[in-house]
Amino acid sequence: MKKHIPNTITCCNLVSGCVATVFALYGDAPMALLWIVIGAVFDFFDGMSARLLGVSSPIGKELDSLADDVTFGVAPSSIVFSFLCGCPFEELPESIAFFLPFVAFVMAAFSALRLAKFNLDERQTTSFIGLPTPANALFWGALIVSMGDTLGATPYGVWAVIAMVFVSSYLLVAELPLFALKFKHWGWKGNEVKYIFLLTSAVMIVLPIVMGWGVIGIAAVIAWYVLLSVVTGK
């Protein structure tokens, strides 16, 4: 019985991603983000439960990647797609304007590629090479929820979003070392970057909420995560 527990949790992640995608396509970005977060919680516990129960399996690894691509690839792409569908592209021919929002799904394809590489890359046991898909999904969900109206108000904002889709897609598969929040011990020495990141991230998330700026702090934390990794070379 216990061997089915991790895969059941993974399926809960997959279902959460499907629900998030539906809300995204209906234009409800806040609910989509909520279900992405719920999926991330399930994603955290499926691997943990498999290790604790000693029931890790190849099928569980493949199922996890499939669920992650839905929750952290298709769902955030759908959020951006829905956002772009609501933006005017008056300067473009109608045929081009109709298809332009589908650019958002480039992220879903690169998320799948990133997950496939992760499964085969033995270097990523204690750190990451390329932006993790959950981080990318949380960035886009928080950005559109908090700044969607502002970004959609001007052509510059809309084109900035499209450009960022390609940038984040590149970061998913880039040979860019990023630290992981995995602690071998709880001391300060050797964990300086991780503790600095956690402390500053707490401030960056809580402060905007207190100031009434919404969840933009989540997107800022993901950007800070990439920048800190690059600066420290972790």
Image (spheres, helix red, strand yellow):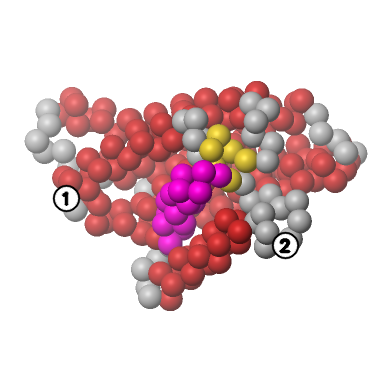
Kindly identify which residue carries mark 2: 187
Would you name the residue on which mark 1 appears?
Answer: 154
Q: Quadrant of residue 30?
A: bottom left
Q: Is residue 145 above or below residue 210?
A: above
Q: Is residue 142 above or below residue 120?
A: below
Front in this rendered view, residue 156 or 172: 172
Q: Which disc, if any, is residue 138?
A: none
Q: What's the residue at 16%, 50% (across, down)? A: 154
* Image: magenta residue range: 217-234
Quadrant in the picture for residue 64 = top right
Q: Is residue 218 magenta?
A: yes
Q: Quadrant of the C terminus?
A: top right
C-alpha span from label 2 to label 1: 48 Å
Q: Considering the numbered disc 1 on the image, is that residue within a helix, a strand or a loop?
A: loop
In the visual, does 122 lie left or right of 138? Answer: right
Secondary structure at numbered mark 2: loop
Taking the spot 46% from the left edge, 26% from the top edge, the residue there is 109
Q: Is residue 178 above or below residue 99?
A: below
Residue type at mark 1?
Thr
Magenta region includes residue 225: yes
Residue at figure coordinates x 55%, y 66% from the top left:
199
Q: Which tag, 2 or 1, sits closer to the chain's start?
A: 1
Question: How dense is the environment of label 2, judged by Cα within 10 Å: few (below 14), some, or many (20 and up)?
Answer: few
Asked whether residue 182 appears in the rendered view, the answer is yes
Task: Please state, as top left, top right, bottom left or bottom right, where the N terminus lies in the image.
Answer: top right
Percent from the top left, x then y, of residue 214? 40, 66
Q: Nearer the viewer, mark 2 or mark 1?
A: 2
User: How far across and how far down the image is residue 39, in percent?
Assistant: 60, 47
Residue found at the very far left of the displayed protein: 91
Q: Amino acid at mark 2?
A: Gly
